[in-house]
Image (cartoon, helix red, strand yellow):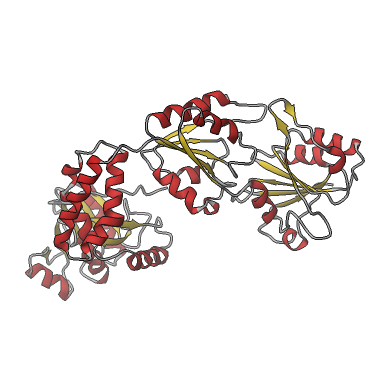
Amino acid sequence: MNHFPIFLSTQNSRIIVSGGGDAALAKLRLLMKTRARITVFAAEPAREIEQWHHEKRLTLVTRAMEHGDAVCVKLFYGANEDATEDARTALLARAYGALVNIVDNLEDSQFITPAIVDRYPVTIAIGTEGAAPVLARAIKADLEERLPQNLGTLARIGKTFRKASYALSFGRARRDFWRAFYFDAGPKAISDGEEHVLPALEALLDMHLHKPARTGHVAFVGGGPGDPELLTLKARRALDEADVVIYDRLITPEILELARREATMIDVGKEGFGRHTPQEYINALLVEHAQAGAQVVRLKSGDATVFGRLDEEIDAVDAHGIGWHIVPGITSASAAVAAIGQSLTRRGRNTSVRFMTGHDTRGFADHDWRTLAQPNEVAAIYMGKKSARFVQGRLLMHGADRHTPVTIIENASRPDQRVLETTLDALPAALEAAQLGGPALTFLGLAPRAAFAAAPSLKLEEFA
């Protein structure tokens, strides 16, 4: 992020626009929505600028900008549509500490003006770092259609009621009140007329002041394989409402970004044969925060019910009478098999599939190797990188074909996804050569579909 988005107070501040043509008009139409004191320097101003000057909406100076004109200026716009004049006037503005924007010159600008959706006091700014203004305008148009015109009216009335809402305790109690207003009571009231909004607010506040405090609760949420677009709507809602998020090592930063800024974020990541957070400590965290009244999200990668030690955590909160629910997620096997264009089961090949772990709390995990060694068996092996040689040895010992296809998908569904195609015989060597650093899922008995293997988007590496 090269441009940090902020909302800058412009009330009674000086803003200068140098230029009087189309570029200046475009900026002025936006700037005149502020309460700034705007001055335009233009020897030949457009008729609209002269009219705005006569209406006292801005001050027009019909000459080029000179030294000393930028005293106490907060923002400067170079809109001369002439590179030499823009550079000259920008230099004058910088000398007095003004932030400078030169129209259509990203490199020499200190700030950029985003596309804006205006439902005052609700303001949405959309920026693309100057890379795609057309895209920003398209997003703006989409939001303009989605947001009702009376949203600003609700927000203005709500603003006058903020001090009254302080009678509710800080945090969730106030958030629940305002959520109920903006998404339920407010829209219903304003449909009958603006005069009905304030009485609706007063009645809503009285109801929230007398309703019992919300009890703590734990949501066990499957965060999916890493792509935030693969989160369920229910998972996103849980993150939005969470006071505390207790998350695993494999949860991606993009998914964590979806949690509220005010939420307490606690990393309890574990790594096979590596960094380890004791399960007892995680259980204690869940109980501690839920007993304090927090809405807790226990965020697990993939699906919470698959190799996530979910039962131990449910038992812990159950023992303290804490409410909970499970939000399913897309497990890594589903994302990984989609990445290679295959299905987990296929008529005539296999009528069952095994989800298995490469290691458990005691070390390398044992399984029904004799059955797995049979032709056409399919298994999805979680946490299988470090146990690859062990798995290979057990399968070969029970008669598995050395040429059985094996596919390893690293970072399934993520931008840095990699796919390794190999055989059971070459599995340990392939993993060593590939030097995988991310989470990987191993498919026994599956190879990438031919059409997918030829696709340039699939980072396929073959090891024989």
The residue positioned 23% from the left and 46% from the top of the image is 207
The residue positioned 43% from the left and 59% from the top of the image is 131
Q: In this view, does 4 lie to the left or right of 149?
A: right
Residue 357 is drawn in which quadrant?
Answer: top right
Q: Is residue 104 left or right of residue 218?
A: left
Q: How many marks?
A: 0
Expressed as whole percent of the image width and height from the top left, the position of residue 9 reads 20, 49
Q: Nearer the viewer, residue 234 or 416?
A: 234
Expressed as whole percent of the image width and height from the top left, the position of residue 421 reads 78, 49
The residue positioned 76% from the left and 33% from the top of the image is 387
Expressed as whole percent of the image width and height from the top left, the position of residue 262 reads 36, 38
Q: In this view, does 189 lie above or below 295?
A: below
Question: In this view of the protein, can residue 97 be seen by the observer?
Answer: no
Q: In this view, does 314 lie above or below 5?
A: above
**Residue that lies at the very extreme toward the bottom in this rendered image:** 47
Q: Nearer the viewer, residue 94 or 259?
A: 259
**Residue that lies at the very extreme toward the right in this rendered image:** 399
